[in-house]
Image: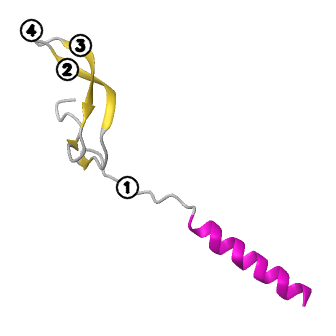
C-alpha cells in the first residue's frame, strides 16, 4: 500500500510539473518573427538625416515584424 501511495505521489508531481515547461521554437538565422505584444521603450539604432547611425528608443507595436539587416 505504501508503494502505491509513493507511485501515485510521483505521478501527480510529474503531471503538475509537465505544465510548467517553457516551449521553445527555433527560428532560423535571417528569418522574420512577428511580435505578439507591444514592447515599450525599446533601445534601437536609427539613421539620422545625414545617414549616421544614432541610438534611440521607441515603442514597437504588436504585429510588427522583426528581422536582421541583410546588409550586416
Location of residue 38 in the rendering, given as x and y in whole percent from the top left corner: 30, 41
Q: CA distance from mark 1 to mark 3?
A: 31 Å
- In the image, residue 35 sits, relative to residue 55, either above or below, namely below
Res 66 → quadrant:
top left
Badge 4 density bin: few <14, some 14–19, many ≥20, Cα 10 Å:
few
Location of residue 46 in the rendering, given as x and y in whole percent from the top left corner: 20, 20
Between disc 1 and disc 4, whose residue precedes? 1
Q: Given the current orientation, which residue lies at the most extreme left position?
A: 49
Badge 1 density bin: few <14, some 14–19, many ≥20, Cα 10 Å:
few
Q: Which residue is mark 3?
A: 54
Between disc 2 and disc 1, whose residue precedes? 1
Location of residue 70 in the rendering, given as x and y in whole percent from the top left corner: 17, 35
Q: Is the residue under label 3 in contact with that under label 1 (CB below 8 Å)?
A: no
Q: Where is the C terminus found, in terms of image quarters?
A: top left
Give the number of the mark in front: 2 or 1.
2
Identify the residue at horizontal 70%, vertical 76% (top origin).
Answer: 12
Q: Secondary structure at mark 3?
A: strand
Q: Secondary structure at mark 1?
A: loop
Q: Is the residue under label 2 in contact with that under label 3 (CB below 8 Å)?
A: yes
Q: Is the residue under label 2 in contact with that under label 4 (CB below 8 Å)?
A: no
Q: CA distance from mark 1 to mark 4?
A: 37 Å
Amino acid at each position: 500500500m505504501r508503494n502505491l501511495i509513493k507511485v501515485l505521489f510521483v505521478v501527480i508531481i510529474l503531471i503538475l510539473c509537465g505544465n510548467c515547461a517553457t516551449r521553445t521554437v527555433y527560428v532560423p538565422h535571417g528569418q522574420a518573427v512577428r511580435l505578439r505584444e507591444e514592447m515599450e521603450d525599446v533601445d534601437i539604432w536609427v539613421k539620422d538625416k545625414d545617414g549616421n547611425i544614432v541610438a534611440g528608443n521607441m515603442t514597437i507595436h504588436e504585429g510588427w515584424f522583426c528581422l536582421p539587416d541583410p546588409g550586416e
